Image (spheres, rainbow, N blue to C red):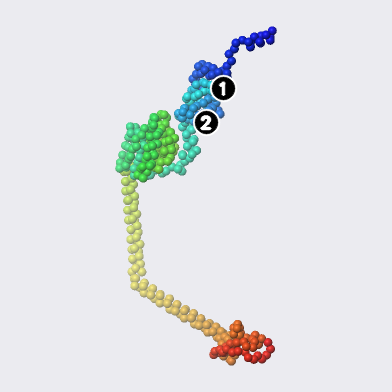
Amino acid sequence: MKQNKTISLFSQKRQVLTVSEVTERIKLCLENTIGTVWVTGEVSNLRQPVSGHLYFSLKDENCQIRCVIFDFTRRLLKFQIEDGMEIIVLGRITVYKKAGDYQIIIDAVEPKGIGTLQIALEQLKRRLEAEGLFDTARKKLIPFLPRAIGIVTSLTGAALQDILNIIERRFSTIHIIIYPVKVQGEGAKEEIAQAIDDFSEFYADYIDVLIVGRGGGSIEDLWAFNEEIVARAITRSRIPVISAVGHETDYTIADLVSDKRALTPSESAEIVVPVKIELIKRLEQLYQKLQYSVHSGVEIAKTKLSTISKSYGWQQPLNRIREYYQRLDELLDKSTSYLKQKIERLSLILTEKSARLNTLSPLNVLSRGYSITRNAKNNKVVKFIKEISMGDNIITQLVDGRFDATVHKINGKK
């Protein structure tokens, strides 16, 4: 019975599907049934090949789903996805047919529990800090009294008017160049960075300091000053940069990389120039102090001169000169006497030495009838008969001259 039933099952008409056809049916079923969904989970196994696409798994304590973010979507993200990050994604459920895996193709991402912009800000801060862009050692000094000031901000914002009004009150003759830019919205970050670069390239020999900023607002309004392109422009600026963004509680990347942070745009104007009236008063005080110092110096010199003029040397200069003449004569007499005694002692010594040398001189011996004979061949003194031979030429030195001779006869033994 069982065998007959099996035969009957295989004998029935049947539809056989390929793996691709089954996968396609599953794909259509998932896409049509589930479609686009919001999903939350933890990122794991994140990887990014050279294509720029992001591949990772989104998991909870029980399950996980493969996810993909294509490069054109990734470029629009405000923050970087990292392993272990809790995120919420919007995506379409589909099947990757080649592997037979179902996955989510993600169209939007936001961090869970913390704002997208806030996490993007923290990530950029960590990266720039690791590069040393926040180090105080690389920051340039703000000049005390600049020749000219550059301002990068919006022409229509209240921040510009606050800066101009305060500079006008403090030091009205300072030259100002304004580079108008968008300070929020599409294209703002590019305009701000370009303005800083243009000032650095074309005005670095004239502009001594830059103010870059805007008035207060939400984190979204201030976001252009948190962009990496603006931070890089401030870092490479040849001109010192004062960041003046928002209010005291607002803190941006521009504040961290700039050479000086102003709590408000108004404070940037107070930082950048001194008060002219106070400066003039200070100069007047220094001038008076200098006058007093010079006057005191003159009075001290007068007192010293008066003391000198009343001294004996000043009152009787000829007497002092005569005293010096007399003193010189005394010193000259002493020197002459000393030299005379010294010469006499040296003469006596020289006479004694000469007498001794004369006694030892060969000439003195010759004067007593002796002579000195030398062999002409080697000019050596002949002391013994054996030092000459028949026919040798000899030279004989007498007290009053010399004569040459030839040996013809030798008496004695060699």
Horizontal placement of 108 versus 2: left or right? left
Q: Quadrant of residue 13?
A: top right
Residue density around tag 2, few if under 14, some if 14–19, many if 20 or more, within 10 Å: few
Q: Is residue 84 visible?
A: no
Q: Amino acid at mark 1?
A: Gly
Residue density around tag 1, few if under 14, some if 14–19, many if 20 or more, within 10 Å: some
- Residue at image position (38%, 41%) is 200
- Foreground disc of the pair 1, 2: 1
Q: Is residue 49 visible?
A: yes
Residue 209 or 263: which is nearer the viewer? 209
Tell me the element at label 2. loop
Residue 173 or 47: which is nearer the viewer? 47
- From mark 1 to mark 2, how far is it between C-alphas? 21 Å
Q: Quadrant of residue 170?
A: top left
Q: Earlier in the sequence, mark 1 or mark 2?
A: 2
Say which mark, if any, is on residue 100: 1
- Residue at image position (45%, 80%) is 337
Tell me the element at label 1. loop
Does residue 62 sit above or below 290 in this rendering? above
Q: Amino acid at mark 2?
A: Gln
**Residue situated furthest left in the rendering:** 173
Say which mark, if any, is on residue 48: 2
**Where's residue 383, x and y in %?**
64, 86
